[in-house]
Image: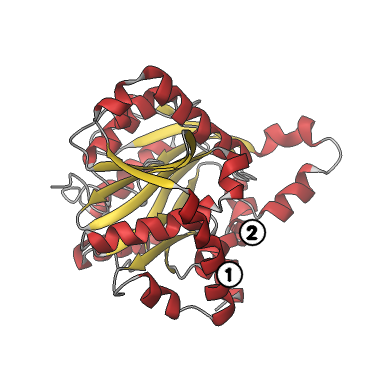
Amino acid sequence: MTRFLNQLEPQSLVDAFLKHPPQDFELYLEKEIPAFTMQFNLLTTLDSKLKKKIENIYGYKRWKNFITFQTCFMGTTVTEYSPLCAQKDINEAIRLFKEIGKEQSLTIIKDLPLNSPLLSDLENKYSQNLIEYAKKQGFFVVEGQALAYVPINFINREDYLSKLSKSRRKNLKRKLKCLDYLRIEWVKTGTTKFQSVEFCKYLYSLYFSVYQQSEIHFDLLTINFFNEILLDAESGGCVALYWFGEELVGYNICYEYQDNLIDKYIGFNYELALKFNLYFVSWFVNLDYALERNLKYYIAGWTDPEVKAQLGAKFTFTTHLVWVRQPILRQVLKPIKHIFEADKKWFQLNT
Protein backbone atom coordinates (compact mmCIF):
# COMPACT_ATOMS: atom_id res chain seq x y z
CA MET A 1 0.00 0.00 0.00
CA THR A 2 1.15 3.54 -0.70
CA ARG A 3 1.43 6.02 2.12
CA PHE A 4 0.67 9.04 -0.04
CA LEU A 5 -1.72 10.08 -2.76
CA ASN A 6 -0.20 10.36 -6.26
CA GLN A 7 2.56 7.87 -5.55
CA LEU A 8 3.58 5.75 -8.55
CA GLU A 9 6.76 4.50 -6.88
CA PRO A 10 7.41 2.18 -3.93
CA GLN A 11 7.69 3.88 -0.55
CA SER A 12 11.25 2.63 -0.18
CA LEU A 13 12.34 5.00 -2.97
CA VAL A 14 10.89 7.96 -1.06
CA ASP A 15 12.54 6.71 2.13
CA ALA A 16 15.92 6.53 0.33
CA PHE A 17 15.45 10.16 -0.82
CA LEU A 18 14.72 11.24 2.75
CA LYS A 19 17.71 9.29 4.06
CA HIS A 20 20.12 10.43 1.33
CA PRO A 21 18.88 13.69 -0.24
CA PRO A 22 20.48 15.03 -3.43
CA GLN A 23 23.58 17.20 -3.20
CA ASP A 24 22.93 20.69 -1.75
CA PHE A 25 19.37 19.79 -0.71
CA GLU A 26 18.26 20.26 2.86
CA LEU A 27 15.26 18.28 3.96
CA TYR A 28 12.41 20.25 5.43
CA LEU A 29 11.20 17.97 8.18
CA GLU A 30 7.49 18.68 8.27
CA LYS A 31 5.02 16.08 9.46
CA GLU A 32 3.58 13.85 6.72
CA ILE A 33 4.81 16.06 3.86
CA PRO A 34 8.14 15.33 2.11
CA ALA A 35 9.86 18.62 1.32
CA PHE A 36 13.29 20.10 0.75
CA THR A 37 14.95 23.49 0.53
CA MET A 38 17.68 24.72 -1.80
CA GLN A 39 19.07 27.81 -3.49
CA PHE A 40 16.98 27.85 -6.69
CA ASN A 41 18.02 29.76 -9.80
CA LEU A 42 14.93 30.82 -11.75
CA LEU A 43 16.63 29.95 -15.04
CA THR A 44 16.97 26.26 -14.10
CA THR A 45 13.92 24.97 -15.98
CA LEU A 46 13.78 27.54 -18.79
CA ASP A 47 13.79 26.51 -22.42
CA SER A 48 17.47 25.81 -23.16
CA LYS A 49 17.75 28.38 -25.98
CA LEU A 50 16.26 31.17 -23.88
CA LYS A 51 18.36 30.15 -20.90
CA LYS A 52 21.58 30.37 -22.93
CA LYS A 53 20.61 33.81 -24.25
CA ILE A 54 20.11 35.13 -20.73
CA GLU A 55 23.30 33.52 -19.43
CA ASN A 56 25.25 35.18 -22.25
CA ILE A 57 24.16 38.64 -21.14
CA TYR A 58 27.16 40.65 -19.97
CA GLY A 59 27.89 40.28 -16.26
CA TYR A 60 25.60 37.28 -15.68
CA LYS A 61 28.01 35.70 -13.19
CA ARG A 62 27.75 38.83 -11.07
CA TRP A 63 24.00 39.37 -11.17
CA LYS A 64 22.76 35.74 -11.22
CA ASN A 65 22.48 35.86 -7.43
CA PHE A 66 19.60 38.31 -7.86
CA ILE A 67 17.55 35.58 -9.57
CA THR A 68 18.51 32.84 -7.09
CA PHE A 69 16.21 32.39 -4.09
CA GLN A 70 15.96 30.26 -0.99
CA THR A 71 13.12 27.96 -2.00
CA CYS A 72 11.13 25.22 -0.35
CA PHE A 73 9.79 22.50 -2.65
CA MET A 74 6.91 20.40 -1.38
CA GLY A 75 7.47 16.95 -2.83
CA THR A 76 10.52 14.94 -3.86
CA THR A 77 12.65 14.54 -6.98
CA VAL A 78 12.30 10.73 -6.97
CA THR A 79 8.51 10.68 -7.43
CA GLU A 80 6.75 11.61 -10.64
CA TYR A 81 4.10 13.52 -8.68
CA SER A 82 4.07 15.41 -5.41
CA PRO A 83 3.06 12.98 -2.65
CA LEU A 84 0.06 14.33 -0.73
CA CYS A 85 -1.51 13.15 2.49
CA ALA A 86 -5.13 12.07 2.04
CA GLN A 87 -5.81 12.61 5.74
CA LYS A 88 -4.84 16.27 5.56
CA ASP A 89 -7.75 18.61 4.84
CA ILE A 90 -7.10 20.90 1.85
CA ASN A 91 -7.64 24.05 3.95
CA GLU A 92 -5.16 22.72 6.49
CA ALA A 93 -2.66 21.81 3.78
CA ILE A 94 -2.72 25.29 2.22
CA ARG A 95 -2.44 26.89 5.65
CA LEU A 96 0.63 24.76 6.30
CA PHE A 97 2.20 25.64 2.95
CA LYS A 98 1.71 29.36 3.59
CA GLU A 99 3.16 28.98 7.08
CA ILE A 100 6.26 27.37 5.56
CA GLY A 101 6.33 30.20 3.02
CA LYS A 102 7.00 32.73 5.77
CA GLU A 103 10.51 31.30 6.08
CA GLN A 104 11.32 31.08 2.33
CA SER A 105 11.43 33.47 -0.60
CA LEU A 106 9.54 30.91 -2.71
CA THR A 107 7.44 27.90 -1.78
CA ILE A 108 6.60 25.54 -4.62
CA ILE A 109 4.21 22.60 -4.46
CA LYS A 110 5.70 20.70 -7.37
CA ASP A 111 4.26 18.26 -9.90
CA LEU A 112 0.58 18.15 -9.05
CA PRO A 113 -1.28 15.87 -11.50
CA LEU A 114 -3.83 17.19 -13.96
CA ASN A 115 -6.38 14.46 -14.72
CA SER A 116 -3.66 11.84 -14.91
CA PRO A 117 -4.68 8.48 -16.43
CA LEU A 118 -2.06 6.90 -14.19
CA LEU A 119 -3.92 7.83 -10.99
CA SER A 120 -7.30 7.19 -9.42
CA ASP A 121 -10.29 9.53 -9.57
CA LEU A 122 -9.79 10.26 -5.87
CA GLU A 123 -6.19 11.38 -6.41
CA ASN A 124 -7.02 13.54 -9.41
CA LYS A 125 -9.96 15.12 -7.58
CA TYR A 126 -7.88 15.92 -4.50
CA SER A 127 -5.20 17.63 -6.59
CA GLN A 128 -7.75 19.59 -8.60
CA ASN A 129 -9.47 20.84 -5.44
CA LEU A 130 -6.10 21.74 -3.94
CA ILE A 131 -5.14 23.75 -7.03
CA GLU A 132 -8.44 25.64 -7.15
CA TYR A 133 -8.37 26.50 -3.46
CA ALA A 134 -4.70 27.53 -3.56
CA LYS A 135 -5.38 29.95 -6.43
CA LYS A 136 -8.04 31.64 -4.31
CA GLN A 137 -5.49 31.94 -1.50
CA GLY A 138 -2.96 33.81 -3.63
CA PHE A 139 -0.83 31.02 -5.07
CA PHE A 140 -0.19 31.25 -8.77
CA VAL A 141 -0.01 28.33 -11.17
CA VAL A 142 2.92 27.41 -13.40
CA GLU A 143 2.29 24.65 -15.91
CA GLY A 144 4.67 21.75 -15.32
CA GLN A 145 6.41 19.14 -17.41
CA ALA A 146 5.10 16.46 -19.75
CA LEU A 147 5.22 12.98 -18.20
CA ALA A 148 5.67 10.35 -20.92
CA TYR A 149 3.88 7.02 -20.68
CA VAL A 150 2.87 4.14 -22.95
CA PRO A 151 -0.26 1.99 -22.42
CA ILE A 152 0.66 -1.67 -22.83
CA ASN A 153 -2.17 -2.34 -25.28
CA PHE A 154 -0.20 -3.86 -28.16
CA ILE A 155 0.39 -7.52 -29.02
CA ASN A 156 4.10 -7.42 -29.75
CA ARG A 157 6.87 -5.09 -30.89
CA GLU A 158 5.79 -5.25 -34.52
CA ASP A 159 2.26 -4.27 -33.54
CA TYR A 160 3.62 -1.31 -31.56
CA LEU A 161 5.80 -0.15 -34.45
CA SER A 162 2.89 -0.43 -36.89
CA LYS A 163 1.20 2.50 -35.13
CA LEU A 164 4.10 4.83 -35.93
CA SER A 165 4.73 6.60 -39.23
CA LYS A 166 6.49 4.71 -42.02
CA SER A 167 9.65 6.84 -41.76
CA ARG A 168 9.86 6.39 -37.98
CA ARG A 169 9.32 2.63 -38.28
CA LYS A 170 12.15 2.39 -40.78
CA ASN A 171 14.48 4.48 -38.63
CA LEU A 172 13.72 2.57 -35.43
CA LYS A 173 14.04 -0.84 -37.05
CA ARG A 174 17.48 0.17 -38.24
CA LYS A 175 18.45 1.24 -34.71
CA LEU A 176 17.04 -1.96 -33.22
CA LYS A 177 19.50 -4.04 -35.24
CA CYS A 178 21.99 -3.05 -32.53
CA LEU A 179 20.26 -5.63 -30.32
CA ASP A 180 22.10 -8.32 -32.28
CA TYR A 181 25.37 -7.17 -30.68
CA LEU A 182 24.17 -6.64 -27.12
CA ARG A 183 23.57 -8.97 -24.20
CA ILE A 184 20.75 -7.83 -21.94
CA GLU A 185 20.74 -8.86 -18.29
CA TRP A 186 17.77 -8.05 -16.04
CA VAL A 187 18.86 -8.09 -12.40
CA LYS A 188 16.65 -7.54 -9.36
CA THR A 189 17.87 -4.96 -6.84
CA GLY A 190 19.22 -6.51 -3.67
CA THR A 191 21.04 -9.35 -5.44
CA THR A 192 24.70 -10.17 -4.88
CA LYS A 193 25.81 -8.31 -8.04
CA PHE A 194 25.06 -5.01 -6.30
CA GLN A 195 27.04 -5.93 -3.19
CA SER A 196 30.22 -5.14 -5.12
CA VAL A 197 31.36 -1.67 -4.05
CA GLU A 198 33.40 -1.21 -7.22
CA PHE A 199 30.52 -2.20 -9.52
CA CYS A 200 28.12 0.21 -7.78
CA LYS A 201 30.72 2.98 -8.04
CA TYR A 202 30.96 2.33 -11.76
CA LEU A 203 27.17 2.41 -12.14
CA TYR A 204 27.13 5.74 -10.35
CA SER A 205 29.84 7.12 -12.63
CA LEU A 206 27.67 6.27 -15.66
CA TYR A 207 24.69 8.03 -14.05
CA PHE A 208 26.93 11.04 -13.39
CA SER A 209 27.93 11.11 -17.07
CA VAL A 210 24.25 11.43 -18.00
CA TYR A 211 23.76 14.15 -15.38
CA GLN A 212 26.64 16.16 -16.82
CA GLN A 213 25.22 15.87 -20.33
CA SER A 214 21.76 17.01 -19.23
CA GLU A 215 20.57 20.54 -19.99
CA ILE A 216 18.85 20.79 -16.60
CA HIS A 217 20.99 20.40 -13.48
CA PHE A 218 18.50 20.34 -10.64
CA ASP A 219 19.05 17.30 -8.43
CA LEU A 220 22.36 15.46 -8.27
CA LEU A 221 21.67 12.16 -6.55
CA THR A 222 24.42 10.85 -4.29
CA ILE A 223 26.28 7.57 -4.42
CA ASN A 224 24.81 6.73 -1.00
CA PHE A 225 21.32 7.04 -2.50
CA PHE A 226 22.32 4.70 -5.33
CA ASN A 227 23.79 2.17 -2.92
CA GLU A 228 20.61 2.28 -0.87
CA ILE A 229 18.25 1.55 -3.77
CA LEU A 230 20.52 -1.02 -5.45
CA LEU A 231 20.77 -3.06 -2.24
CA ASP A 232 17.01 -2.95 -1.56
CA ALA A 233 15.58 -6.39 -2.27
CA GLU A 234 12.00 -5.48 -1.31
CA SER A 235 11.34 -2.49 -3.57
CA GLY A 236 10.46 -4.23 -6.83
CA GLY A 237 13.49 -2.64 -8.43
CA CYS A 238 14.92 -4.22 -11.57
CA VAL A 239 18.01 -3.15 -13.48
CA ALA A 240 18.51 -3.74 -17.19
CA LEU A 241 22.23 -4.08 -17.87
CA TYR A 242 23.41 -3.80 -21.49
CA TRP A 243 26.68 -5.57 -22.27
CA PHE A 244 28.92 -5.57 -25.33
CA GLY A 245 31.14 -8.52 -24.62
CA GLU A 246 32.39 -7.88 -21.10
CA GLU A 247 31.95 -4.09 -21.30
CA LEU A 248 28.92 -2.38 -19.82
CA VAL A 249 27.27 -0.09 -22.38
CA GLY A 250 24.66 1.30 -20.00
CA TYR A 251 21.73 0.47 -17.77
CA ASN A 252 18.22 1.41 -16.68
CA ILE A 253 16.97 1.25 -13.09
CA CYS A 254 13.23 0.57 -13.21
CA TYR A 255 10.52 -0.32 -10.72
CA GLU A 256 7.67 -2.72 -11.21
CA TYR A 257 4.98 -1.29 -8.96
CA GLN A 258 1.18 -1.25 -8.99
CA ASP A 259 1.14 -3.05 -12.37
CA ASN A 260 3.31 -0.39 -14.00
CA LEU A 261 6.96 -0.28 -15.06
CA ILE A 262 8.49 3.02 -13.98
CA ASP A 263 11.79 3.96 -15.66
CA LYS A 264 13.69 6.03 -13.09
CA TYR A 265 17.45 6.25 -13.73
CA ILE A 266 19.87 5.61 -16.56
CA GLY A 267 23.61 5.42 -16.91
CA PHE A 268 25.53 5.50 -20.19
CA ASN A 269 29.03 4.67 -21.29
CA TYR A 270 28.51 7.36 -23.90
CA GLU A 271 30.93 6.22 -26.58
CA LEU A 272 29.33 2.75 -26.69
CA ALA A 273 25.80 3.92 -25.87
CA LEU A 274 25.77 6.20 -28.91
CA LYS A 275 27.30 3.53 -31.11
CA PHE A 276 24.57 1.04 -30.16
CA ASN A 277 21.67 3.55 -30.05
CA LEU A 278 21.05 2.55 -26.46
CA TYR A 279 18.49 5.29 -25.73
CA PHE A 280 16.20 3.88 -28.42
CA VAL A 281 17.05 0.23 -27.87
CA SER A 282 16.31 0.45 -24.12
CA TRP A 283 12.89 1.97 -24.85
CA PHE A 284 11.82 -1.16 -26.71
CA VAL A 285 13.48 -3.54 -24.26
CA ASN A 286 11.47 -1.89 -21.46
CA LEU A 287 8.27 -2.17 -23.51
CA ASP A 288 9.00 -5.86 -24.11
CA TYR A 289 9.52 -6.37 -20.38
CA ALA A 290 6.25 -4.61 -19.50
CA LEU A 291 4.38 -6.68 -22.10
CA GLU A 292 5.85 -9.97 -20.86
CA ARG A 293 4.85 -9.09 -17.29
CA ASN A 294 1.28 -8.12 -18.29
CA LEU A 295 1.69 -4.61 -16.91
CA LYS A 296 -0.65 -1.68 -17.62
CA TYR A 297 1.74 1.17 -18.38
CA TYR A 298 5.37 1.90 -19.09
CA ILE A 299 6.08 5.25 -17.39
CA ALA A 300 9.09 6.88 -19.03
CA GLY A 301 9.69 10.11 -17.09
CA TRP A 302 9.87 13.84 -17.81
CA THR A 303 12.94 14.40 -19.97
CA ASP A 304 13.21 14.57 -23.78
CA PRO A 305 9.49 14.83 -24.63
CA GLU A 306 10.18 15.47 -28.32
CA VAL A 307 12.16 12.24 -28.68
CA LYS A 308 9.67 10.23 -26.64
CA ALA A 309 6.82 11.54 -28.78
CA GLN A 310 8.62 10.15 -31.84
CA LEU A 311 8.91 6.83 -30.00
CA GLY A 312 5.13 6.68 -29.57
CA ALA A 313 4.67 8.02 -26.04
CA LYS A 314 1.56 9.71 -24.74
CA PHE A 315 1.79 12.59 -22.26
CA THR A 316 0.08 13.78 -19.14
CA PHE A 317 0.88 17.17 -17.60
CA THR A 318 1.40 18.57 -14.15
CA THR A 319 1.16 21.96 -12.56
CA HIS A 320 3.16 23.70 -9.84
CA LEU A 321 1.66 25.96 -7.18
CA VAL A 322 3.94 28.87 -6.30
CA TRP A 323 3.76 31.04 -3.20
CA VAL A 324 5.96 34.16 -3.29
CA ARG A 325 6.60 35.75 0.07
CA GLN A 326 7.55 39.28 -1.07
CA PRO A 327 4.66 41.18 -2.73
CA ILE A 328 7.02 43.02 -5.12
CA LEU A 329 8.61 39.78 -6.31
CA ARG A 330 5.14 38.30 -6.75
CA GLN A 331 4.18 41.18 -9.04
CA VAL A 332 7.36 40.68 -11.08
CA LEU A 333 7.09 36.91 -11.48
CA LYS A 334 3.40 36.36 -12.08
CA PRO A 335 3.18 38.12 -15.50
CA ILE A 336 6.23 36.26 -16.84
CA LYS A 337 5.39 32.79 -15.53
CA HIS A 338 4.70 31.58 -19.09
CA ILE A 339 8.44 31.58 -19.89
CA PHE A 340 8.86 28.73 -17.39
CA GLU A 341 6.31 26.55 -19.20
CA ALA A 342 8.50 25.09 -21.97
CA ASP A 343 6.80 21.67 -22.17
CA LYS A 344 3.36 23.23 -22.47
CA LYS A 345 4.51 25.44 -25.35
CA TRP A 346 6.15 22.45 -27.08
CA PHE A 347 2.97 20.39 -26.75
CA GLN A 348 0.74 23.16 -28.10
CA LEU A 349 3.01 23.63 -31.12
CA ASN A 350 3.12 19.92 -31.93
CA THR A 351 -0.47 18.78 -31.45
Observer-side mark, 1 or 2, equals 1
Q: Nearer the viewer, residue 11 or 57?
A: 11
Image quadrant occupied by the C terminus:
bottom right
Q: How many marks?
A: 2
Graded by Cα atoms within 10 Å as few (under 14), some (14 to 19) or many (20 or more), the crowding at tag 1 reads few
Helix, strand or loop at label 2? It is helix
Residue under the image location 29 percent in, 54 percent down: 261
The spot of residue 262 in percent (x, y) is 33, 52
Instruction: Name the amino acid type tagged 1.
Output: Asn
The spot of residue 265 in percent (x, y) is 42, 42
Residue that carries the numbered disc 2 in the rendered image? 339
Residue 134: in sight, yes or no? no
Task: Give the answer, above or below, for where 239 lies relative to 159.
Answer: above
Residue under the image location 24 percent in, 36 percent down: 12
Task: Give the answer, above or below, for where 150 lies relative to 200.
Answer: below
Q: Nearer the viewer, residue 216 or 168?
A: 168
Graded by Cα atoms within 10 Å as few (under 14), some (14 to 19) or many (20 or more), the crowding at tag 2 reads some
Residue 186: in sight, yes or no? yes
Helix, strand or loop at label 1? It is helix
Q: Is residue 161 left or right of residue 234?
A: right
Mark 1 → mark 2, Cα distance in angstroms: 33 Å
Q: Earlier in the sequence, mark 1 or mark 2?
A: 1
Asked where in the image residue 115 lies, by quadrant, the reply is: bottom left
The spot of residue 284 in percent (x, y) is 41, 60
Which scheme is used to colour this image of the protein? secondary structure
The label shown at residue 171 is 1
Q: Is residue 250 left or right of residue 159?
A: right
The spot of residue 17 in percent (x, y) is 34, 32
Instruction: Name the amino acid type tagged 2.
Output: Ile
Q: Nearer the viewer, residue 45 or 239?
A: 239
Q: Is residue 256 left or right of residue 22?
A: left
Residue under the image location 46 percent in, 33 percent down: 246
